[in-house]
Amino acid sequence: MVSYKELGLVNSREMFEKAIEGGYAIPAFNFNNMEQMQAIIQACVEASSPVILQVSSGARKYANQTLLRYMAQGAVEYAKELGKNIPIVLHLDHGDTFELCKSCIDMGFSSVMIDGSSLPYEENVALTKRVVEYAHQFDVTVEGELGVLAGIEDDVQAEASTYTRPEDVEDFVKKTGVDSLAISIGTSHGAYKFTPEQCTVNEDGKLVPPPLAFDVLKAVEEKLPGFPIVLHGSSSVPQDEVETINANGGALKAAIGIPEEWLRESAKSAVCKINIDSDSRLAMTAAIRKVFVDNPAEFDPRKYLGPARDNMEKLYKHKIINVLGSAGKA
Ligand code: G3H
Ligand code: 13P
Ligand code: ZN
């Protein structure tokens, strides 16, 4: 058993309080390798932002749970070495069983998500409550979810989304004791959130997806004043990265994400954690593909992983400064 406190990590409680009060959101960036972790920490230190490093169960299998724990501890030390002691949370993304959540808590995670959103309501309540009771003994914070997001959630695949029912949220939070709540308002996981056919063209010629259910977010806020709300599936799918990938041998289909202005607006509300994974994958892949095409003789991994890391850092900084508003809040 390792406590996250020994690793220099923090839970999300104070971070969320400050974010709601200040009208910004904490970046929750997924990582599964060293370059992503370095890019996240470099960006957050430079922009002086608090950060949630999040790990899916797939990422945990990929990177190995023991290594991840030391990587998170390394992230804390690395930030200090770069000159800033920023608050860092190590969070389990989309935990689907009590056992997985417990194992992460026992291994030094400071926050876990138990995603019972695909279960019948009462089963979601029971599972979430069980995780909260265990986690709170160790001052670990817990995120629950109500409503289903479309797209791929790790090993769980949801075809259709169901918006969160605002009439359930108060009861869910009261019965489970969760510290934050992920809601479904029309975002989805992965790069293919909307097709061009679903979008309209604005006066600048940009494709605009159908609006999110901001009325649901507003109704949830009214039911739970000041309570931390989480937005999953918040990648914006930068079109320049998609173009670079496709110009360098990639074969991505037309992919449209969540407009950044919508995230900026959400961050001013009770949404205090915004999850971004796919955009980082696109930035990494675009940079690597470009090196491979520009210099096919290159075979030193540092020569393509280095540019990939730089491109991700640029993306993370842009999100922090221009979208989430968490710059300077560390
Ligand atoms: O919510 C899904 C995250 O993007 C994690 O994806 O399960 O492929 O690591 P993953
Ligand atoms: P994206 O696929 O939109 O990056 O969403 C990530 C996410 O919600 C992780 O939990
Ligand atoms: Zn998610």
Image: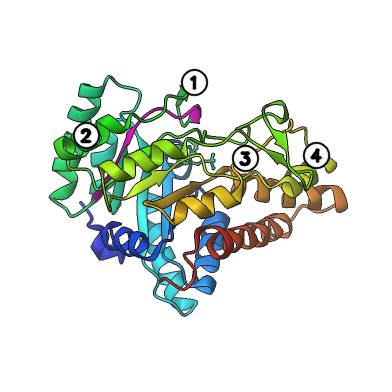
Marks 3 and 2, how far apart in space? 29 Å
Q: Which residues are magenta?
A: 141-152
Q: Amino acid at mark 4?
A: Asn
Q: Can you identify the residue that label 3 sits on?
A: 257
Closer to the eye: label 2 or 4: 2
Question: Which is more N-terminal, label 2 or label 3?
Answer: 2
Q: Can you identify the residue that label 4 sits on?
A: 246
Element assignment for label 4: helix
Closer to the eye: label 4 or 3: 3
Closer to the eye: label 1 or 4: 1
Most common SS among magenta residues: strand
> In the figure, 29 relative to 318: above or below?
above
Element assignment for label 3: loop
Q: Can you identify the residue that label 2 sits on?
A: 172
Residue 8 point in image, percent of width and height: 30, 67
| Pointer 3 local density, CA inside 10 Å: few below 14, some 14–19, many at least 20 | many
> In the figure, 125 relative to 131: above or below?
above
Marks 4 and 3, how far apart in space? 17 Å
Residue 160 is labelled as 1
Question: Which is more N-terminal, label 1 or label 2?
Answer: 1
Marks 2 and 4, how far apart in space? 44 Å
Question: For disc 4, does the CB lie below 8 Å from ligand 2?
Answer: no
